[in-house]
Image (cartoon, grey):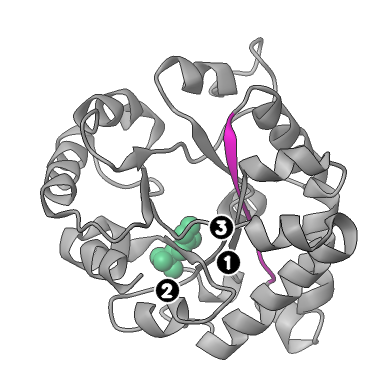
Amino acid sequence: MRNKIVAGNWKMNKNLEETAALLATLSAKLPDTGAEVMVAPTFVNLPGAVRDLESSKIEVIAQNMHFAENGAYTGEISGSMLQSIGIDTVIIGHSERRAYFGETDEILAKKVTAALARGLRVMFCFGEELEDRKSDNHFAVVERQLKNALFSLDAGAWSKIILAYEPVWAIGTGETASPEQAQEMHAFIRKTITDTYGGSIADNVSILYGGSVKPGNASEIFSKPDVDGGLIGGASLVADDFIAIINAI
Ligand code: 13P
Protein backbone atom coordinates (compact mmCIF):
# COMPACT_ATOMS: atom_id res chain seq x y z
CA MET A 1 0.00 0.00 0.00
CA ARG A 2 1.28 3.45 -0.81
CA ASN A 3 2.63 5.76 1.91
CA LYS A 4 1.28 9.12 2.94
CA ILE A 5 4.04 11.72 2.66
CA VAL A 6 4.41 15.38 3.59
CA ALA A 7 7.63 16.97 2.33
CA GLY A 8 8.96 20.50 2.72
CA ASN A 9 11.00 21.92 -0.15
CA TRP A 10 12.90 24.80 1.38
CA LYS A 11 14.32 25.91 -2.00
CA MET A 12 17.02 28.62 -1.61
CA ASN A 13 15.91 29.69 1.87
CA LYS A 14 17.37 29.53 5.40
CA ASN A 15 21.02 29.96 6.33
CA LEU A 16 22.90 27.64 8.72
CA GLU A 17 21.49 29.11 11.90
CA GLU A 18 17.94 29.42 10.57
CA THR A 19 18.03 25.85 9.30
CA ALA A 20 19.11 24.50 12.68
CA ALA A 21 16.42 26.53 14.47
CA LEU A 22 13.61 25.37 12.16
CA LEU A 23 14.73 21.75 12.35
CA ALA A 24 14.83 21.90 16.17
CA THR A 25 11.28 23.26 16.32
CA LEU A 26 9.97 20.77 13.79
CA SER A 27 11.50 17.77 15.58
CA ALA A 28 10.19 18.96 18.93
CA LYS A 29 6.64 19.47 17.61
CA LEU A 30 6.44 16.61 15.09
CA PRO A 31 3.08 14.87 15.44
CA ASP A 32 2.86 11.11 14.95
CA THR A 33 0.46 10.85 12.02
CA GLY A 34 1.89 7.71 10.46
CA ALA A 35 2.88 9.76 7.39
CA GLU A 36 6.48 10.07 6.24
CA VAL A 37 7.78 13.60 6.83
CA MET A 38 10.70 14.97 4.81
CA VAL A 39 12.53 18.27 4.53
CA ALA A 40 14.83 19.45 1.76
CA PRO A 41 17.21 22.19 2.98
CA THR A 42 19.85 23.73 0.70
CA PHE A 43 22.91 21.64 -0.18
CA VAL A 44 25.26 23.44 2.20
CA ASN A 45 22.97 22.68 5.12
CA LEU A 46 22.37 19.01 4.34
CA PRO A 47 25.18 17.47 6.44
CA GLY A 48 24.17 19.53 9.49
CA ALA A 49 20.51 18.66 8.97
CA VAL A 50 21.29 14.94 8.73
CA ARG A 51 23.21 15.19 12.03
CA ASP A 52 20.52 17.29 13.72
CA LEU A 53 17.77 14.85 12.73
CA GLU A 54 19.70 11.66 13.53
CA SER A 55 17.22 10.63 16.20
CA SER A 56 14.19 12.25 14.57
CA LYS A 57 11.64 10.60 12.28
CA ILE A 58 11.99 13.46 9.81
CA GLU A 59 13.98 12.45 6.72
CA VAL A 60 16.40 14.90 5.14
CA ILE A 61 16.26 14.86 1.35
CA ALA A 62 18.09 16.75 -1.41
CA GLN A 63 16.60 19.23 -3.89
CA ASN A 64 18.59 18.11 -6.94
CA MET A 65 21.60 16.12 -8.17
CA HIS A 66 23.72 15.78 -11.30
CA PHE A 67 23.52 12.60 -13.37
CA ALA A 68 27.28 12.08 -13.54
CA GLU A 69 29.11 10.20 -10.80
CA ASN A 70 31.88 12.83 -10.64
CA GLY A 71 34.00 14.94 -12.97
CA ALA A 72 34.35 18.41 -14.45
CA TYR A 73 30.90 19.83 -13.63
CA THR A 74 31.66 22.95 -11.63
CA GLY A 75 29.04 23.72 -9.03
CA GLU A 76 27.28 20.36 -9.29
CA ILE A 77 26.68 17.57 -6.77
CA SER A 78 26.40 13.85 -7.49
CA GLY A 79 24.16 11.14 -6.11
CA SER A 80 27.10 9.35 -4.51
CA MET A 81 28.06 12.55 -2.68
CA LEU A 82 24.53 12.78 -1.32
CA GLN A 83 24.64 9.17 -0.18
CA SER A 84 28.01 9.72 1.47
CA ILE A 85 26.37 12.19 3.87
CA GLY A 86 23.38 9.96 4.59
CA ILE A 87 20.80 11.17 2.05
CA ASP A 88 18.50 8.48 0.60
CA THR A 89 15.98 10.54 -1.38
CA VAL A 90 16.40 13.25 -4.00
CA ILE A 91 13.94 15.61 -5.69
CA ILE A 92 14.30 15.60 -9.48
CA GLY A 93 12.49 17.70 -12.08
CA HIS A 94 11.21 20.59 -10.00
CA SER A 95 9.61 23.19 -12.28
CA GLU A 96 12.11 25.82 -11.11
CA ARG A 97 14.95 23.57 -12.32
CA ARG A 98 13.14 23.13 -15.63
CA ALA A 99 12.35 26.85 -16.03
CA TYR A 100 15.51 28.55 -14.73
CA PHE A 101 18.22 25.93 -15.29
CA GLY A 102 17.21 24.44 -18.62
CA GLU A 103 16.46 20.95 -17.35
CA THR A 104 14.76 19.12 -20.20
CA ASP A 105 12.87 15.82 -20.12
CA GLU A 106 16.01 14.21 -21.56
CA ILE A 107 18.28 15.54 -18.79
CA LEU A 108 15.73 14.56 -16.16
CA ALA A 109 15.53 11.01 -17.54
CA LYS A 110 19.32 10.76 -17.13
CA LYS A 111 19.11 12.08 -13.57
CA VAL A 112 16.35 9.65 -12.63
CA THR A 113 18.26 6.72 -14.10
CA ALA A 114 21.47 7.74 -12.31
CA ALA A 115 19.73 8.20 -8.95
CA LEU A 116 17.95 4.85 -9.15
CA ALA A 117 21.13 3.09 -10.25
CA ARG A 118 22.71 4.28 -7.02
CA GLY A 119 19.74 3.08 -4.96
CA LEU A 120 18.43 6.56 -4.18
CA ARG A 121 14.71 7.16 -3.93
CA VAL A 122 13.46 9.75 -6.44
CA MET A 123 10.75 12.32 -5.82
CA PHE A 124 9.91 13.24 -9.40
CA CYS A 125 8.19 16.61 -9.94
CA PHE A 126 6.18 17.60 -12.98
CA GLY A 127 3.17 19.71 -13.88
CA GLU A 128 1.72 21.93 -16.56
CA GLU A 129 2.02 25.69 -17.05
CA LEU A 130 -0.93 28.05 -17.08
CA GLU A 131 -1.08 28.23 -20.90
CA ASP A 132 -1.23 24.43 -21.06
CA ARG A 133 -4.27 24.39 -18.78
CA LYS A 134 -5.94 27.29 -20.56
CA SER A 135 -5.53 25.53 -23.91
CA ASP A 136 -6.72 22.24 -22.42
CA ASN A 137 -3.34 20.60 -22.98
CA HIS A 138 -2.61 19.88 -19.32
CA PHE A 139 -3.21 16.13 -19.51
CA ALA A 140 -1.06 15.79 -22.63
CA VAL A 141 1.79 17.79 -21.05
CA VAL A 142 1.76 15.74 -17.86
CA GLU A 143 1.63 12.50 -19.82
CA ARG A 144 4.62 13.61 -21.91
CA GLN A 145 6.64 14.61 -18.84
CA LEU A 146 5.97 11.24 -17.18
CA LYS A 147 6.63 9.16 -20.27
CA ASN A 148 9.84 10.93 -21.25
CA ALA A 149 11.46 10.71 -17.82
CA LEU A 150 10.01 7.56 -16.28
CA PHE A 151 8.39 5.18 -18.70
CA SER A 152 11.60 3.52 -19.86
CA LEU A 153 12.21 2.29 -16.33
CA ASP A 154 11.86 -1.36 -15.35
CA ALA A 155 8.73 -2.13 -13.36
CA GLY A 156 10.91 -2.88 -10.32
CA ALA A 157 12.23 0.69 -10.23
CA TRP A 158 8.81 2.07 -9.31
CA SER A 159 9.14 1.04 -5.67
CA LYS A 160 11.75 3.83 -5.44
CA ILE A 161 9.63 6.52 -7.13
CA ILE A 162 7.48 9.16 -5.45
CA LEU A 163 5.56 11.50 -7.76
CA ALA A 164 4.84 15.15 -7.04
CA TYR A 165 2.31 16.83 -9.32
CA GLU A 166 2.93 20.56 -9.11
CA PRO A 167 0.98 22.72 -11.56
CA VAL A 168 3.37 25.61 -12.30
CA TRP A 169 0.57 28.19 -12.07
CA ALA A 170 -0.05 27.18 -8.44
CA ILE A 171 3.56 27.36 -7.20
CA GLY A 172 4.23 30.31 -4.94
CA THR A 173 1.24 32.16 -6.38
CA GLY A 174 -1.29 31.59 -3.61
CA GLU A 175 -3.52 30.06 -6.26
CA THR A 176 -4.07 26.39 -5.43
CA ALA A 177 -5.53 23.78 -7.70
CA SER A 178 -8.97 22.99 -6.35
CA PRO A 179 -9.21 19.64 -4.59
CA GLU A 180 -11.26 18.46 -7.58
CA GLN A 181 -8.62 19.60 -10.09
CA ALA A 182 -5.92 17.84 -8.04
CA GLN A 183 -7.96 14.63 -7.79
CA GLU A 184 -8.78 14.70 -11.50
CA MET A 185 -5.09 14.98 -12.45
CA HIS A 186 -3.90 12.46 -9.86
CA ALA A 187 -6.45 9.92 -11.12
CA PHE A 188 -5.24 10.59 -14.69
CA ILE A 189 -1.63 10.05 -13.59
CA ARG A 190 -2.51 6.76 -11.92
CA LYS A 191 -4.41 5.63 -15.02
CA THR A 192 -1.46 6.55 -17.26
CA ILE A 193 0.82 4.44 -15.08
CA THR A 194 -1.71 1.59 -15.05
CA ASP A 195 -1.84 1.58 -18.86
CA THR A 196 1.91 1.02 -19.09
CA TYR A 197 2.86 -0.82 -15.90
CA GLY A 198 -0.41 -2.29 -14.56
CA GLY A 199 -2.67 -1.51 -11.64
CA SER A 200 -0.51 -2.85 -8.85
CA ILE A 201 2.40 -0.48 -9.57
CA ALA A 202 0.01 2.44 -10.09
CA ASP A 203 -1.79 1.72 -6.81
CA ASN A 204 1.44 1.55 -4.86
CA VAL A 205 3.05 4.81 -6.01
CA SER A 206 2.53 7.83 -3.77
CA ILE A 207 1.39 10.90 -5.71
CA LEU A 208 1.85 14.18 -3.83
CA TYR A 209 0.25 17.49 -4.73
CA GLY A 210 2.31 20.69 -4.59
CA GLY A 211 1.40 24.33 -5.18
CA SER A 212 0.31 26.81 -2.51
CA VAL A 213 -0.66 24.16 0.04
CA LYS A 214 -1.39 25.99 3.30
CA PRO A 215 -2.84 25.01 6.69
CA GLY A 216 -6.23 26.30 5.50
CA ASN A 217 -6.53 24.15 2.37
CA ALA A 218 -4.41 21.06 3.17
CA SER A 219 -7.15 18.88 4.71
CA GLU A 220 -9.47 19.22 1.77
CA ILE A 221 -6.75 18.48 -0.79
CA PHE A 222 -5.39 15.54 1.23
CA SER A 223 -8.89 14.08 1.61
CA LYS A 224 -9.02 13.21 -2.09
CA PRO A 225 -8.51 9.48 -2.75
CA ASP A 226 -5.60 9.80 -5.20
CA VAL A 227 -3.76 12.54 -3.30
CA ASP A 228 -1.24 10.87 -1.01
CA GLY A 229 0.24 13.97 0.57
CA GLY A 230 1.94 17.19 -0.36
CA LEU A 231 5.18 18.83 -1.43
CA ILE A 232 5.15 22.13 0.39
CA GLY A 233 7.19 25.23 -0.44
CA GLY A 234 6.51 28.50 1.37
CA ALA A 235 4.44 27.07 4.20
CA SER A 236 7.17 24.54 5.08
CA LEU A 237 9.43 27.45 6.12
CA VAL A 238 7.14 28.33 9.02
CA ALA A 239 7.19 25.64 11.72
CA ASP A 240 3.60 26.02 12.90
CA ASP A 241 2.24 26.04 9.34
CA PHE A 242 4.21 22.95 8.33
CA ILE A 243 3.14 21.13 11.52
CA ALA A 244 -0.50 22.06 10.81
CA ILE A 245 -0.15 20.66 7.27
CA ILE A 246 1.40 17.45 8.64
CA ASN A 247 -1.54 17.17 11.03
CA ALA A 248 -3.92 17.59 8.08
CA ILE A 249 -2.69 14.32 6.57
P1 13P B 1 4.61 26.68 -2.70
O1 13P B 1 4.02 25.76 -1.64
O2 13P B 1 5.37 27.82 -2.12
O3 13P B 1 3.59 27.08 -3.71
O4 13P B 1 5.72 25.81 -3.49
C1 13P B 1 5.40 24.56 -3.95
C2 13P B 1 6.64 23.91 -4.44
O5 13P B 1 7.21 24.32 -5.44
C3 13P B 1 7.19 22.78 -3.68
O6 13P B 1 8.20 22.13 -4.37
Which label belongs to residue 166?
A: 1
Mark 2 Cβ and ligand 1 under 8 Å apart: yes
Q: Which residue is mark 2?
A: 212
**Amino acid type shown at disc 2:** Ser
Q: Is residue 63 left or right of residue 194?
A: left
**Amino acid type shown at disc 3:** Arg
Which corner quadrant of the figure contains ligand 1? bottom left
- Does residue 107 sit above or below 234 in this rendering? above
Quarter of the view holding residue 78 = top right
Q: Which residues are magenta?
A: 120-128
Q: Which residue is mark 3?
A: 2
Mark 1 Cβ and ligand 1 under 8 Å apart: yes
Residue beneath the point at 24% across and 28% down:
54
Q: Is residue 41 visible?
A: no
Residue beneath the point at 23% across and 57% down:
32
Q: CA distance from mark 3 to mark 2?
A: 23 Å
Tag in front: 3 or 2: 3
